[in-house]
């Protein structure tokens, strides 16, 4: 880390997959992994290019069953470019002698640079310098500039560039028993002496893909076509110390794009009109400069450097271009094939950050959910419920994409996957609807699409709750909470758990917000909703009742993760750490031993403690109060301590949540978990998973930790609420945000001083509420507020 650059020195084959993920370049429409252009997919390298929302569904035979999976498609590879001396072997770091190798990811510029010096025998050295960009101003363009310098000798150099349509989805080892051949009808052709094209389509979703490449150099270009590959070749003359340049400019379109007639025609036309590399770079830099201004973040030291990298990857996955697309939040970004590119609940950790910088992107991501509301309602009806049951994993059309089997790499066994029972994803969507509207002031969305989603999610929870005469409370049974280690009770025949605390409390919150919204809707709009949905007074009374009587289990004066959690056996944590070292994936370890984590008080990640992540202490106490339960500071502290000692952190989200909760509780251990969240991907703490794609929720969550977690920032009631917490390791930081029509509101915390600068505009004043006072700031005004120690 060197300020705004991310550098790798030396060539390390074992680290290539990790580097390729962290050096991915994208623009919100498509992204390409940071693989070296001369290297093909193998056990070391994995070039991959992914278009947001481009999925395909295939059926594979696994463990004697036919299993259907939908994947984000690895589209044709536009990168290939390799060189050799006449008659010699192609040069790659794996086959030639590397004297020097350096890769630099320039964050401010959105540019990946590599320098490699190949020793060719004697005193002959060839320097290869490449600059790569995926254009942030024009989302359909990418470019690769290659510069070749002969150090101390003269030679000819053969150059071969290609578009490769023979790719498959093979980037995740545990998926390799599944069919990954998503592309078919691959054809290539020549559009001009310097331009070739490739077209294909996905096998079942029938998405047509068009790609065109223009090769520019001071040498004539010859074209050659092989099955599934369009190849361009040229020969350069290098004098001693001279440099020759080859530019490859690529355009990519699919049939999902608006305002085109044919993706191949659009790609050829776009690459034909594209300017040269220098001009492309200039407009690309301007677009990135605008993004960095809108997402301004000033955090000192190593933490700030890592946060810049996290922000870079969030913006590459979800940029303003995303606002024009029908896509959700892929949990692993556009950086690899883990989780098959599916959309989980990770948006719960992503949208709160985007709401205050790129609300138009948040709105688009919520529209992805709204377009699939009918599918969610159909899913609920299929299991005899009313309302909307959103899938745990979503892809192209909103059906449940969670696989029915998953592979344990430790045992080699395919096991049933019951994670589809995580119905709490609906509460995450409702939470994001509410938070987006509070942060943006978008009443139109709240009253229309937002209200429709909130109403149907609330309806599902009310219909899922069953009244228990003995308890005098409603219960929600047969679910799985955020802790995916627990899918069933020990020795139970059927999966599912009863009264997961996180599920029940968030369901109560959804019901309360839905009631609040129905009451606040303009009367004509309320009438429309009632007519369209059949909502009546009796159903609203049920919502009110359930929202106040959902059961939240306790044991030993702490909140139980679910009913019966306290009756499970204690795990020998010290013994397992001594035997295995890293026990983050305790579920795989125990299953390989013939045991199951369902028997133990052991959690994969934050579950109950997620409540402290979503809700401020005051709001959480209010929720429990609405349920007729008392949650005092002592009970919450005991609950935090209890689960701290029983969590293996098998998810990158876990350290983030624990750091957030402990910081809000003003606990000394907070920084330890914040550090784990920051290091999660760059240090590959989950053991090889980052090479399959970055963890977008964890990256965005660390940004939000600074933005909302440490500042106590809430957007509710038309005001900015702030309650900063002192974190000795991060006592000085600043950022800009967008709030209710104000662009570039700057907040800066310097120990006991909070400074808020509101830029000049014709927008309304901002009410800022601290625990001990309220301040009204006019546009153009700066507030300097002393904080109590």
Image (cartoon, grey):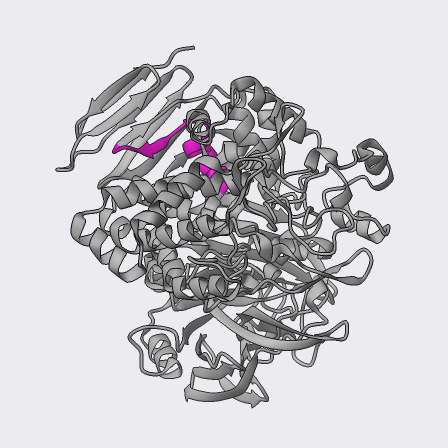
Vertical placement of residue 319 versus 212, above or below: above
User: Residue 350, position in %: x, y?
Assistant: 45, 46
User: Residue 185, position in %: x, y?
Assistant: 53, 88
State which quarter of the image contains the N terminus: top right
Q: Residue at x 55, y 46 (%)?
A: 476
Residue 581, by quadrant, is: top right
Q: Is residue 732 magenta?
A: no
142 or 309: nearer the viewer: 309
131 or 595: nearer the viewer: 595
Left or right of residue 647: residue 323 = left
Left or right of residue 678: residue 519 = left
Q: Residue at x 54, y 82 (%)?
A: 203
- Quick one: which residue is furthest to the top in this view? 789
Vertical placement of residue 750 versus 195, above or below: above
Magenta region: 701-718
187 or 330: nearer the viewer: 330
745 or 721: nearer the viewer: 721
Left or right of residue 50: residue 538 = left
Q: Residue at x 59, y 50 (%)?
A: 479
Q: Is residue 243 visible?
A: no
State which quarter of the image contains the C terminus: top left
User: Residue 465, position in %: x, y?
Assistant: 50, 47
User: Residue 435, position in %: x, y?
Assistant: 36, 42
């Amino acid at each position: 880390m060197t300020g705004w650059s991310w550098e790798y020195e030396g060539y390390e084959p074992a680290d290539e997959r990790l580097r390729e993920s962290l050096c991915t370049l994208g623009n919100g429409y498509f992204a390409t992994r940071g693989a070296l252009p001369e290297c093909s997919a193998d056990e070391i390298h994995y070039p991959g290019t992914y278009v947001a929302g481009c999925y395909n569904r295939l059926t594979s035979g696994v463990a004697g069953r036919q299993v259907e999976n939908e994947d984000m498609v690895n589209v044709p590879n536009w990168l290939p470019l390799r060189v050799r001396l006449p008659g010699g072997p192609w040069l790659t770091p794996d086959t030639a002698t590397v004297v020097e190798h350096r890769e630099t990811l320039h964050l401010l510029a959105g540019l990946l640079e590599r320098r490699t010096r190949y020793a060719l025998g004697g005193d002959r050295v060839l320097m290869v310098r490449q600059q790569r960009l995926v254009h942030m101003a024009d989302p359909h363009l990418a470019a690769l500039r290659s510069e070749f310098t002969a150090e101390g000798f003269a030679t000819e150099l053969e150059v071969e560039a290609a578009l490769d349509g023979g790719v498959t989805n093979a980037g995740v080892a545990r998926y390799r028993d599944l069919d990954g051949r998503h592309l078919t009808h691959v054809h290539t052709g020549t559009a001009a002496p310097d331009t070739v094209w490739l077209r294909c389509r996905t096998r079942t979703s029938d998405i047509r893909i068009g790609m065109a490449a223009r090769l520019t150099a001071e040498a004539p270009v010859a074209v050659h076509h092989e099955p599934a590959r369009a190849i361009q070749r040229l020969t350069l003359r290098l004098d001693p110390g001279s440099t020759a340049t080859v530019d490859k400019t690529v355009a990519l379109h699919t049939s999902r794009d608006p305002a085109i007639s044919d993706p191949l025609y659009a790609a050829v036309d776009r690459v034909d009109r594209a300017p040269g590399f220098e001009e492309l770079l200039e407009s690309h830099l301007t677009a990135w400069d605008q993004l960095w201004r809108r997402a301004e973040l000033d955090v000192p030291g190593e933490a700030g450097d890592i946060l810049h990298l996290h922000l870079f990857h969030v913006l590459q996955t979800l940029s303003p271009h995303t606002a024009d697309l029908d896509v959700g939040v892929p949990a692993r970004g556009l950086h690899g094939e883990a989780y098959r590119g599916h959309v989980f609940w990770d948006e719960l950790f992503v949208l709160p950050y985007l709401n205050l910088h790129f609300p138009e992107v948040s709105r688009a991501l919520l529209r992805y959910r709204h377009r699939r509301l009918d599918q969610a309602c159909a899913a609920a009806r299929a299991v005899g419920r009313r309302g909307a049951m959103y899938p745990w994993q979503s892809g192209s059309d909103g059906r449940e994409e969670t696989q029915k089997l998953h592979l344990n790499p430790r045992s080699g066994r395919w096991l049933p996957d019951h994670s589809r029972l995580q119905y709490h994803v609906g509460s995450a969507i409702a939470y994001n609807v509410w938070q987006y509207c509070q942060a943006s002031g978008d009443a139109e969305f709240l009253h229309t699409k937002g209200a429709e989603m909130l109403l149907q999610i609330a309806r599902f929870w009310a219909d899922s709750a069953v009244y228990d005469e003995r308890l005098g409370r409603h219960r929600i049974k047969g679910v799985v909470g955020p802790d995916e280690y627990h899918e069933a009770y020990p020795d139970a025949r059927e999966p599912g758990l009863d009264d997961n605390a996180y599920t029940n409390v968030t369901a109560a919150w959804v019901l309360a917000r839905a009631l609040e919204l129905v009451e606040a809707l303009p009367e004509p709009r309320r009438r429309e909703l009632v007519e369209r949905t059949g909502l009546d007074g009796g159903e609203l009374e049920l919502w009110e009742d359930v929202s106040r009587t959902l059961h939240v289990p306790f044991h030993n004066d702490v909140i139980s993760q679910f009913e019966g959690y306290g009756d499970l056996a204690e795990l020998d944590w010290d013994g397992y750490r001594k035997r295995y070292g890293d026990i983050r994936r305790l579920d795989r370890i125990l299953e390989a031993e013939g045991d199951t984590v369902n028997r133990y008080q052991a959690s994969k990640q934050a579950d109950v403690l997620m409540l402290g992540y979503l809700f401020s202490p005051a709001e959480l106490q209010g929720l429990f109060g609405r349920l007729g339960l008392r949650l005092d500071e002592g009970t919450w502290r005991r609950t935090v301590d209890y689960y701290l000692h029983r969590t293996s952190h098998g998810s990158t989200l876990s350290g983030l949540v624990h750091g957030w909760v402990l910081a809000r509780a003003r606990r000394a251990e907070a920084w330890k978990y914040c550090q784990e969240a920051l290091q999660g991907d760059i240090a590959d703490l989950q053991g090889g998973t980052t090479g399959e794609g970055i963890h977008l929720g964890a990256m965005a969550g660390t940004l939000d930790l600074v933005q909302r977690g440490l500042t106590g920032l809430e957007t509710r009631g038309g005001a900015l609420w702030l309650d900063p917490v002192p974190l000795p390791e991060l006592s000085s930081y600043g950022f800009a945000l967008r709030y209710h029509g104000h662009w570039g509101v700057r907040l800066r915390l310097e120990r006991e001083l909070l400074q808020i600068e509101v830029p000049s505009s014709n927008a309304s004043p901002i009410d800022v509420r601290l625990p001990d006072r309220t301040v009204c700031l006019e546009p153009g005004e700066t507030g300097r507020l002393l904080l109590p120690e």
